[in-house]
């Protein structure tokens, strides 16, 4: 883990300026997932004004990756595979023990659900958003939304009911989800 105090280092500035694909606020730290390969996660602690780089769990090359916050924990959702083909979707949680950081796999999308998501196109347009114990998965290319429910043990995966409006539109698709919108700021 590398740290930079005060002004943003040149390398971090380049990552943040050109390659930031996803940003999340968790426990006083603003985390940014870069989209440049290989992925990296850069965090800015709002209390100490310290920049840190958080190592990404293996494999280093992820597909359609997202950061989410769940009950004060930073989580990473990402597709993994071989030969630049996404074959599975995993969810990891970052465990913090003193100055040690470790990613732990907490869930894997069941293969039958993954195959339904990837049959029309590849998984590259997969999106996700989290809210408390729920992680929602959707794609630009179709109307189905899947949820992973972490309030169940083990985590439960299920499809949400199809939107009744989608039957009336030939090219209807989900473009985004608003789940408990809020602004977490302290100035």
Image (tube, rainbow, N blue to C red):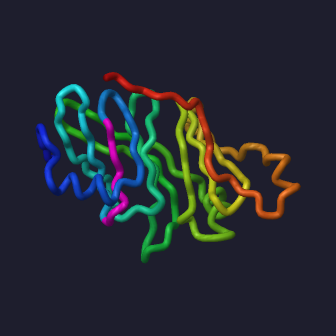
Kindly identify the residue that appears in the image at 65 percent across and 56 percent down: 113
Q: Residue furthest right?
A: 168
On the question of residue 183 being in view, the answer is: yes
Where residue 178 appears, as percent x and y from the top left, is 61, 38
Please count the marks in the image. 0
Name above or below for residue 183 compared with residue 128.
Answer: above
Kindly identify the residue that appears in the image at 40 percent across and 28 percent down: 72
Where residue 6 appears, as percent x and y from the top left, is 12, 38
Kindly identify the residue that appears in the image at 86 percent across and 55 percent down: 167
Where residue 68 appears, as percent x and y from the top left, is 45, 41
- Quadrant of the rendered image containing residue 60: bottom left
Q: Residue furthest front?
A: 187
Of residues 100 and 4, the one drawn nearer to the viewer in this rendering: 4
Determine if the magenta segment contains residue 32: yes
Of residues 132 and 168, the one drawn nearer to the viewer in this rendering: 168
- Quadrant of the rendered image containing residue 52: top left
Query: Main SS type for the magenta part?
Result: strand
On the question of residue 153 being in view, the answer is: no
Instruction: Pick the quarter of the image with the C terminus.
Output: top left
Question: Horizontally, is 37 left or right of 129 in the view?
Answer: left
Where residue 31 appears, as percent x and y from the top left, is 33, 41
Question: Horizontally, is 95 left or right of 91 in the view?
Answer: left
Name above or below for residue 157 compared with residue 120.
Answer: above
Question: Horizontally, is 24 left or right of 165 in the view?
Answer: left
Magenta residue span: 30-37
Kindly identify the residue that appears in the image at 56 percent across and 37 percent down: 154
Determine if the magenta segment contains residue 66: no
């Amino acid at each position: 883990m590398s740290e930079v105090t005060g002004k943003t280092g040149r390398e971090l500035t380049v990552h943040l300026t050109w390659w930031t694909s996803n940003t999340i606020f968790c426990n006083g730290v603003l985390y940014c997932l870069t989209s440049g390969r290989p992925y990296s996660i850069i965090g800015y602690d709002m209390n100490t004004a310290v920049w840190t780089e958080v190592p990404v769990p293996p494999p280093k090359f992820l597909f359609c990756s997202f950061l989410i916050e769940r009950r004060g924990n930073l989580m990473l959702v990402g597709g993994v595979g071989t030969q630049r083909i996404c074959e599975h979707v995993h969810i990891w949680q970052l465990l913090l023990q003193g100055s040690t950081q470790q990613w732990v796999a907490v869930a894997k999308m069941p293969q039958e659900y993954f195959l339904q998501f990837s049959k029309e196109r590849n998984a590259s347009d997969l999106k996700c958003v989290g809210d408390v114990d729920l992680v929602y998965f959707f794609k630009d290319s179709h109307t189905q939304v899947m949820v992973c429910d972490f309030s169940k043990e083990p985590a439960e995966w299920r499809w949400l009911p199809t939107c009744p409006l989608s039957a009336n539109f030939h090219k209807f698709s989900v473009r985004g989800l608003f789940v408990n919108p809020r602004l977490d700021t302290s100035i």
